[in-house]
Amino acid sequence: MEKKLRLRFVSWSISIVFVVLVIILVGVNVINYIQVANQLPHLAPHMVRVEDISNFRDHPPEYWMCYRFFVSSMQVGAIAFVALSVFIYLFSPKIIAVVVDGYERQQQFITGVTHELKTPLAIIKGNAEVIGMQDGHTAWTKGIIEQTNRLNGLVEYLISLAKLEEDLGMPKAEFCISDVFMDSCIFFEGVAKTKDREISYEIQPNLMFCGDVQNIELLISILLENAMKYSNEHSIIYVCLRNIKGKINISITNHAQNLEVRQYPEWFDRFYRADDSRHSSGFGIGLSMARAIVSSHKGKITAESLDGKTVVIKAIL
């Protein structure tokens, strides 16, 4: 992970330095030429083509001065570029180390806390079940068991999310993603009917994909569950799977209310939940897991409303 971050940081930094230096050098040379040309109007007719560069003595001294300034500025720019590139390369480990250390501390904290929670949750649930068997289940014991199951689900989600974000190299193999999508859509059709929704799907057949099939199944489940949870009643959820320019394109479209016409990157933040969705169950980490799964497959996921009435979540793998 540290090597990848360092390589990305160095490449982006050097690219930015190169672009900035080019812009500065071009601007400086243009300004210099304009100043000379304004002071000496007769300089413009003497501008020379590249093949005539050897005939400097046939041109006025002002032209020679512009050319020397150009060459000198290019040399200074080249030296500055090399010096800054070396500086970035040498100091990048220290910069990246700070970022990686903070990230690893966060992941260790999450992993440690979730593992520590599993044992007391199991004890609480076990005790509640024993009390229920001895004295009969009441609303209190049922509530305890329900909430411990809910917290256990959160713990498992956080552990899975931490593993995905650590990029531990999940086992990947080639499989038919069309079949995986079809099976998931057929399963969720029954679930959708119980919630007064309908699923309409357009799946391109025989699409092969190399990835972690379990995580892809989880990705589909997260997106469909999210669409059913936040879509309007008696509405249709549209699922589309296609191959576009050699990449797997997934889109889930559902009707919703009170949307702004914009993109919603904050939906993929961990524990994010909109104010009007607080009444629904869940912890707000489903879409963050979806983003982690897509990222682990070198992909990109976005959420956007184009008309304020529908929301489209797109993933490209």
Image (tube, grey):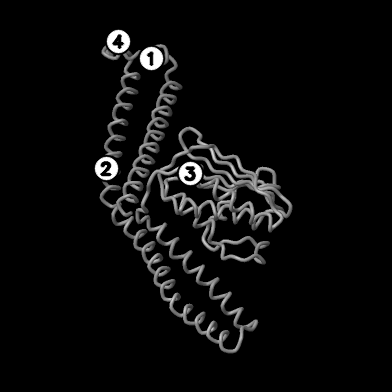
Upstream in the sequence, badge 4 or badge 1?
A: 1
Q: Residues within 10 Å of mark 1 (few under 14, many from 20)?
A: few
Q: Which residue is mark 3?
A: 177
- Residue drawn where x is 35% and y is 59% of the image: 100
Residue pointed to by mark 4 = 58
Q: Residues within 10 Å of mark 4 (few under 14, many from 20)?
A: few
First in residue order: circle 2 vs circle 3: 2
The residue indicated by pointer 1 is: 47
Q: Position of residue 306 (x, y in %)?
A: 66, 43
Above or below, comparing residue 132 to residue 167 in the picture: below
Alpha carbon distance from label 2 to label 3: 49 Å
Q: Quadrant of residue 70?
A: top left
Q: Kindly report which numbered mark, 1 or 2, lies closer to the viewer in this rendering.
A: 2
Which of pointers 2 and 4 lies earlier in the amino acid sequence? 4
- The quadrant of the image that shows the N terminus is bottom left
**What kind of residue is marked 2?**
Ala
Q: Which residue is mark 2?
A: 83
Question: In this view of the protein, which residue sits in the foreground, 285 or 260?
Answer: 285
Alpha carbon separation for disc pair 3 and 1: 62 Å
First of labels 3, 1 by sequence position: 1
Which three-letter amino acid code belongs to the residue tagged 1? Met
Mark 1 or mark 2: name the one nearer the start of the chain: 1
Q: Earlier in the sequence, mark 3 or mark 4?
A: 4
Residue occupying image coordinates x 43% and y 65% = 159
Comparing marks 4 and 1, which lies closer to the viewer? 1
Tell me: 139 left or right of 9: right
Relative to residue 283, is residue 83 depicted above or below? above
Q: Amino acid at mark 4?
A: Asp
